[in-house]
Image (cartoon, grey):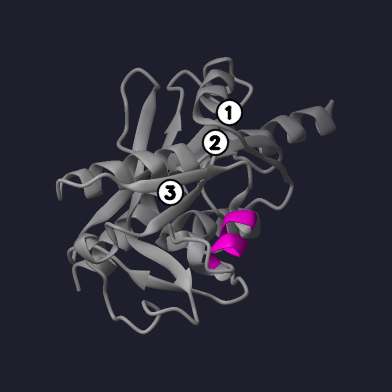
Amino acid sequence: MKTAVESARVAGVAGNGHLRIGLIASLSKGPLRNVVQRFLEEHDNVDLLFVESDRSELLTLLSHRRLDAVYAAGEPEDEIGDGIIVAREDIYLAVAEDGLLADRERLTWDDVADLNFVVSAREPGPEIHDYILRRVSDLGRSAHVRRHRLGREGIMTLVGLGLGVSLVADHWRGATYPNVVFVPIGASGESVPFTLSWRPENDNPPLRRLLSLARLEAERVVATSSE
């Protein structure tokens, strides 16, 4: 009985249990990685499970309590549940290191409107595709976007081979790829929000601790950006 009571007490403070997170993002660097690292340091007995999939599947899993939280680009949406913007990230263009754009300090959308963009048919490729179309159409042009049934590494390989360019958010730059560099694009301050979403009725203790850490990280990011 004493062991059962102790287990219940520890679970109540997120000392053990399970936490399932859906991702349309990378853990290679950035605010979410910071949150996960801090969580692991404080709660190494919690079993973490990560799932990458398309947005509709992740949100279905979230609504059915098969996931505790989903981290993806976009503003919080009431129909999904509760949400917190953890970061607003700068946008970069992945280009071939031996190409003409690699040495530029910053690119404008006019600079790249006529280039060939390559994106994944998987998430976050469709979102990136739509973002490119919006930004290039603002210039009165039609964007040249090719979708490939490849993951992130495959798309970056195409960029390194000189077969096109691709957009990434800042946190994707934690990984390196052969002959690929990342150049800031857009006006200074152009960014994409990334939101951690969850169902308000979910009382999983590890989730509540994750949310506390995410709020602290969001405050830190805002404070750092305002310095």
- Residue 156 is one of the magenta-drawn residues: yes
In percent of width and height, residue 98 lies at: 49, 82
Residues in magenta, as a range: 154-159
Residue at numbered disc 3: 214
Residue 183 as seen in the image, left or right of residue 210: left
Q: Secondary structure at mark 1?
A: loop
Residue at numbered disc 2: 207
Whether residue 12 is visible here, answered yes or no, is yes
Q: Secondary structure at mark 3?
A: helix
Give, as a three-letter code, the residue at label 1.
Asn
Question: Which mark identifies residue 204?
Answer: 1
Q: Residues within 10 Å of mark 2 (few under 14, many from 20)?
A: many
Give, as a three-letter code, the residue at label 3.
Ala
Residue at image point 74% right, 47% down: 45
Q: Residues within 10 Å of mark 3 (few under 14, many from 20)?
A: many
- Tell me whether the residue at label 3 lies in contact with that at label 2, contact meaning CB atoms closer than 8 angstroms: no
Distance from disc 3 to disc 2, alpha carbons, whole Å, reads 10 Å
- Tell me whether the residue at label 1 lies in contact with that at label 2, contact meaning CB atoms closer than 8 angstroms: yes
Residue 6 as seen in the image, left or right of residue 54: right
Q: Which of the two residues, 149 or 57, is positioned nearer the viewer here?
A: 149
- In terms of sequence position, does the residue under pointer 3 or pointer 1 come before the other? 1
Q: Residues within 10 Å of mark 1 (few under 14, many from 20)?
A: some
- Tell me whether the residue at label 3 lies in contact with that at label 1, contact meaning CB atoms closer than 8 angstroms: no
25, above or below 29, in the image: above
Q: Which of the two residues, 202 or 14, is positioned nearer the viewer here?
A: 202
